[in-house]
Image (spheres, grey):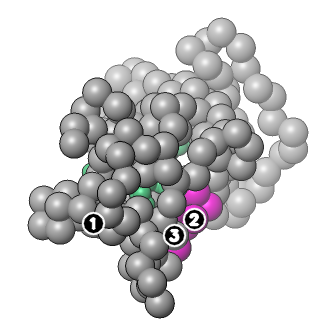
Amino acid sequence: MPDNSAANIAGMAAGDERLHYDRVEIALHWTTAAFVAVLWLLGQGWGYLPRGSDGRHALQDLHVSLGLLFTAVLAARILWRLGPGRRPLPATTGLAEVAAKLVHYLLYVLLTGQVVLGWLWRWANHDPLSLFGLFTIPSPAAFTKAQKTLFGNLHGTIANVILILAGLHAAAALFHHFALRDGVLRRMLPAGRRGR
Ligand code: HEM
Ligand code: HEM
């Protein structure tokens, strides 16, 4: 099978649009990565503070407010990707291409599930689902204790699965960049940092 991957097509200009993601996709990708890191760290952080303390509640409220902002970022990202977003040529071929696609789709699914579970867990906890106190989104239903436990267990587990998967994904991108030197990482970098 001929190797048509962007990484291996010779003679393409460095600025060729088929080789990299568009500006919006790149901005949303790195915003997503930053949100996931901060949300995960906050989720770990309040565990060191005493239960019921003001500090613990403040970190949880911050997590939920940032979680609401992240909901908007993720929705924008998925809508952009399904709509006007530019899809560059695949970076690799064969098994590597299938594995990369699988990880990307799995990340989208897990991130969406995580957001839904976060909303549900907050409602089931009877705490306000609020954006920095500006407004509150009321619960559409009453949840049982068993449901609350289920939402919590799933949200806590998926947080770690996302982190592991994103870590492997980032390691693969860095391996392409430093070991294979094939320009895959540059596909997700802003124009000014793409180099040649
Ligand atoms: C990828 C995004 C997210 C990650 C990585 C994440 C991570 C975490 C982690 C690690 C915990 C602690 C779990 C535990 O104690 O077992 C947690 C708790 C929680 N998260 Fe998230 N979260 C995310 C998104 C969201 C969103 C979007 C919301 C809702 C707007 C949300 C709401 C909550 C709530 C309500 C808790 C429990 C707080 C409490 O104990 O009262 N999370 N999250
Ligand atoms: C929580 C962190 C991250 C998440 C959730 C994430 C998610 C994703 C997703 C879903 C895609 C697929 C884009 C699409 O085609 O729709 C993607 C692509 C990409 N990501 Fe990440 N990413 C994260 C962190 C990173 C990091 C830290 C790096 C670099 C060290 C990185 C490098 C890349 C590259 C180079 C691509 C393009 C791959 C290609 O051209 O096939 N990502 N990322």
* For residue 24, side relative to residue 129 (left or right): left
The circle drawn on residue 172 is 1
Q: Secondary structure at mark 1?
A: helix
Q: Position of residue 85 (x, y in %)?
A: 63, 42
Q: Is residue 91 visible?
A: no
Q: Which of the two residues, 97 or 147, is positioned nearer the viewer here?
A: 97
Residue type, mark 3 in image: Lys
**Position of 58 relative to 22 (above/below):** above
| Circles 2 and 3: CB atoms closer than 8 Å | yes
Name the residue: 22% across, 42% down: 196
Q: Which residue is mark 3?
A: 101
Residue 66 highlighted magenta (yes or no): no
Q: Which residue is mark 2?
A: 105
In the image, the segment drawn in magenta is 102-110
Instruction: Answer with the quarter of the image where residue 155 lies.
Output: bottom right
Cα–Cα gap, marks 2 and 1: 16 Å
Name the residue: 81% across, 36% down: 139
**Count of numbered labels shown in the rendering:** 3
Q: Is residue 85 visible?
A: yes
Name the residue: 37% across, 53% down: 12
Residue type, mark 1 in image: Ala
- Label 2 CB, ligand 2: below 8 Å? yes
Residue 107 highlighted magenta (yes or no): yes
Callout 1 crowding tier (Cα within 10 Å): few <14, some 14–19, many ≥20: some
Q: Position of residue 45 (x, y in %)?
A: 30, 39
**Position of 163 relative to 103 (above/below):** above
| Majority secondary structure in the magenta region | helix
**Position of 135 relative to 97 (above/below):** above
Q: Secondary structure at mark 2?
A: helix
Closer to the chain start, of discs 2 and 1, is 2
Cα–Cα gap, marks 1 and 3: 13 Å
